[in-house]
Image: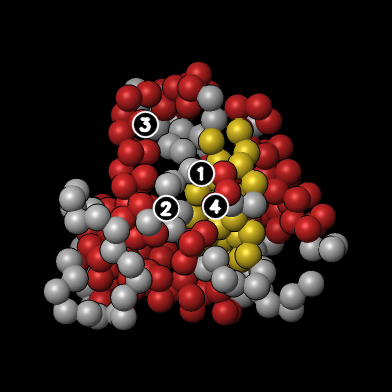
């Protein structure tokens, strides 16, 4: 078993309860969850200030269709679109976080960014359509299933652009979990059990 901090990455379908699961998992394991904080830290490194979170998120997610796969390049390379500057700075932030303490990182291609990390566990959270439709109405302000799917299409484009991989493909992760079958809390327990078993090897 590695003495390095343990890093858990969570990728999720919109409406699957992945964020809620991540929050529960952080409490169960007693480790921090990093999500929006990564945007803030990256923005500070880029010298971007005074923008509301929504504007920073737009900058982060502004993937221009047609540019194709953008492999990792040195930070601050000239000619890279600002959205790419944000991504590569977020990569640097994730590297720094992974060296400090055990933590959970939500989204942001972390499963690929940190794939060579010695104590990494990556999970993909999905759910059946009725489960997601219900959460779209009850949790996400009345979003339709089509709206949820449109957000996932953006996530898939973002993931492919920066990793060259297909988002949600099972062999990118240690485990794919359907929260519609277990519920969010039991899915978090399953991750805890999986990690305990894996670390006993």
Please tell me whether mark 3 or mark 1 is closer to you in this view.
1
What x and y, as percent, mark residue 91?
Answer: 40, 71
Quarter of the image where the N terminus is located: bottom right
| Label placed on residue 172 | 4
Mark 2 lies on a secondary structure that is loop
Which residue shows up at 37% across the image and 23% down it?
145
| Separation of residues labelled 4 and 3 (CA atoms) | 22 Å
Q: Residues within 10 Å of mark 1 (few under 14, many from 20)?
A: few
| Separation of residues labelled 3 and 2 (CA atoms) | 21 Å
| Separation of residues labelled 2 and 4 (CA atoms) | 8 Å
| Separation of residues labelled 1 and 2 (CA atoms) | 8 Å
Q: Residue furthest top?
A: 130
What x and y, as percent, mark residue 119?
Answer: 67, 69
Which residue shows up at 48% across the image and 75% down it?
95
User: Are the residues flagged by discs 1 and 2 in contact, CB closer than 8 Å?
Assistant: yes
Q: Earlier in the sequence, mark 2 or mark 4?
A: 2
| Label placed on residue 169 | 1
Which residue shows up at 52% across the image and 68% down it?
114
| Separation of residues labelled 3 and 1 (CA atoms) | 18 Å
Residue 201 versus residue 187 in the image, above or below = below
């Amino acid at each position: 078993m590695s003495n390095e901090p343990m890093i858990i990455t969570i990728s999720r379908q919109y409406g699957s309860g992945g964020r809620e699961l991540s929050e529960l998992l952080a409490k169960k394991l007693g480790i921090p969850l990093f999500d929006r904080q990564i945007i803030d830290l990256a923005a500070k490194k880029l010298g971007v200030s005074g923008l509301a979170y929504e504007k920073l998120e737009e900058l982060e997610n502004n993937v221009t269709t047609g540019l194709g796969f953008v492999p990792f390049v040195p930070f601050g390379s000239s000619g890279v679109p600002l959205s790419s500057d944000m991504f590569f700075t977020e990569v640097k932030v994730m590297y720094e976080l992974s060296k400090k303490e055990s933590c959970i990182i939500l989204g942001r291609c972390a499963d690929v960014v940190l794939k060579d990390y010695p104590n990494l566990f990556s999970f993909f959270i999905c759910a059946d359509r009725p489960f997601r439709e219900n959460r779209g109405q009850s949790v996400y302000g009345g979003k339709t299933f089509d709206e949820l799917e449109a957000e996932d299409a953006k996530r898939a484009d973002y993931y492919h652009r920066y990793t060259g991989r297909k988002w949600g493909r099972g062999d990118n992760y240690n485990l794919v979990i359907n929260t519609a079958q277990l519920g969010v809390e039991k899915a978090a327990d399953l991750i805890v059990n999986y990690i305990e078993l894996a670390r006993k090897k």
